[in-house]
Amino acid sequence: MAASSSALILLLAVGLVAGASATSFSITNRCSFTVWPAATPVGGGRQLNRGETWNLDIPGGTSSGRIWGRTGCSFNGNSGRCSTGDCGGALSCTLSGQSPLTLAEFTLGSQDFYDISVIDGYNLPMDFSCSTGVNIQCRDPSCPDAYHQPNDVRTKACSGNRRFNVVFCP
């Protein structure tokens, strides 16, 4: 009995530590049309109708990733095609999307970093923010807050953050 109680306590402790290190992303579609957000390496993708929000938890140990919106999609089950941001015809992306796509990029660690990139083109207006940092805005292809080439310095930092917001068509 004591051994099983100890095992249960250890299991609960591990679960609490793992849960505490998760990072939450709230992805909202404010566009007048359906957007198909995608996330790699965790999350995959899904349909997001106007006004809907997708809450995505990135597990501890995930060091970096990308989120983008796909447009003009048509899926039959898990396969189909998108006009922008397509990832090999898959609903649940395991590959990065094809140009053009507006990218929300993040790196997670003791300090979190985030940015918007239009290096691979622009397809949707986007805001990207964290609970302890600034809101990055990208309203058109010129996006002064976004990376336009690899050596731009547009990355923002968050300390102790575990909540991010991505909004399409803010």
Image: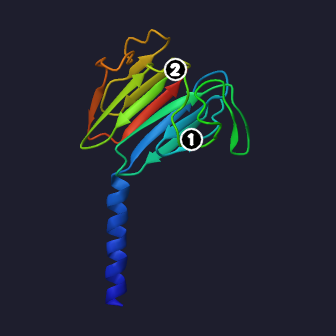
Among all residues in the image, which is located at the extreme bottom? 1
Callout 2: helix, strand or loop?
Answer: loop
Residue 98 at x, y percent in the picture: 56, 27
70 left or right of 151? right
Q: Amino acid at mark 2?
A: Pro
148 left or right of 109? right
The quarter in which the N terminus is drawn is bottom left
Residue 91 at x, y percent in the picture: 64, 41
Q: Which residue is mark 1?
A: 93
Front-most of residues 46 and 121: 121
Q: Which residue occupies 60% across, 43% down?
A: 92
| Residue 141 to residue 75: above or below | above
Q: Label 2 neighbourhood size at 10 Å, few (<14), some (14-19), many (20+)?
A: some
Q: Which residue occupies 30% across, 18% down?
A: 151
| Residue 132 to residue 9: above or below | above
Among all residues in the image, which is located at the extreme right? 76
From mark 2 to mark 1, how far is it between C-alphas?
A: 24 Å
Front-most of residues 1 and 34: 34
- Sooner in the amino-acid sequence: mark 2 or mark 1: 1
Q: Label 1 neighbourhood size at 10 Å, few (<14), some (14-19), many (20+)?
A: many
Kindly report which numbered mark, 2 or 1, lies closer to the viewer in this rendering.
1
The colour scheme of the drawn protein is: rainbow
Q: Place residue 157 in its image quadrant.
A: top left
Q: Which residue is mark 2?
A: 170
Q: Amino acid at mark 1?
A: Cys
